Amino acid sequence: MSATNFGIIIACHARDAHYAAGCYASIRHFMPGTPICFLYDGDDPPKKLANLPNTSFITRRSCQNEALRKRSFRPGFTKMVAFFESPFETFLYLDADTTVCGDVSHLADFEKFDIVVDKRYNYTDEDIQRWYFSPARIAAAFPEFDWSKHRTDYFCTGTFFSKRNALSLERYFELLDVHESNPGLFQFWEMGLLNFMIFEAADKGQSCVNGIPYQIITCDHSAAALQQDFNRWLNDIKNGEPPVVYHYPLNKPHMRQHRSYSAPMTHFRKHFFIMQTGRLGWNNNAALNLEDIRFHYVPEMKRKAFINLIYEPYKKVGLRRVIKKIKSK
């Protein structure tokens, strides 16, 4: 594929722009000449990402389609804008909380396929219910869709390859209407809806879809194995192994996160500061810590305080009712 036809789209918002910076730095390390577009859930680009070389932006303000502007700039669904307003004919989509390892651009054969997704698992009915959609409700709402035959195809939507307009904008809005009027039908923001949409289009012959294993969900692997793997990537001794995308969806990759391996994101967040300042020092670690405090620890403290404020009184009331009921017997 030619460089002018292919680019990478990174979706982000104000609270994860610091992860998007790490993602950007990983691309510049392994794919230095690849154009990048930030798909930003906001009106104006964040200062941290503005004016970077060989980059562009799609924001809520600059989105061309009015309906997309109103309905698709929100958690999860922002990525759907990429299918219809990508500045590239073909693209790799990445969530902000990802890093690439190696030149992933050649993984997708766009001469044969319209969409290329990660393919790793054989999902049970319970898995599909948890991560994607209610099989029973999907069968009732869309009886023509054979959801069960795709149990080895469904994927985590933090990354995928696609041609622009590989999916139908009209169908997207139809499914968005269904999603909004049927809470719980599709799971995890856009993930269930997008999987349904991709494989429905494939079944109808509207898009040609391929699946290859290239996304590493870090919490599914041991830190020791991933550390060894990442060090080999940095030292360019992968011996022909295919490139991958590291994704940190459940345990966000702040510096002091120990539930899954987050060192690649930390490494490239530091690399971003080096790219910006031209030097490495204690102040780069301090800057990362300040970002983590601002965008992770403070919001997490507010969330827990809100939960305690709202739910603790109900817990106490519930406990009183149980005690009262026991005494009455």
Image (spheres, grey):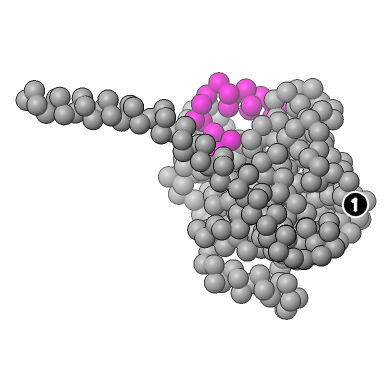
Dot 1 surroundings within 10 Å: few (below 14), some, or many (20 or more)?
Answer: few
Residue 114 percent location from the top left of the image: 77, 47
Please give the residue where the numbered disc 1 appears in the rendered image: 53
Asked whether residue 11 is drawn in magenta, I would say: no
Q: Residue furthest left?
A: 329
On-image quarter of the C terminus? top left
* Residue at screen point 64% across, 35% down: 75
Is disc 1 placed on a helix, strand or loop?
loop
Q: Nearer the viewer, residue 68 or 12?
A: 12
Relative to 42, residue 202 above or below: below
Residue 81 in picture, x, y percent from top left: 75, 35
Q: Closer to the camera, 55 or 274?
A: 274
Residue 171: x %, y % from top left: 70, 28
* Magenta-colored span: 170-189
Q: Please determine whether, in this image, residue 28 is positioned above or below residue 55.
A: below
Q: How many marks?
A: 1
Q: In screen coordinates, is 194 left or right of 316?
A: right
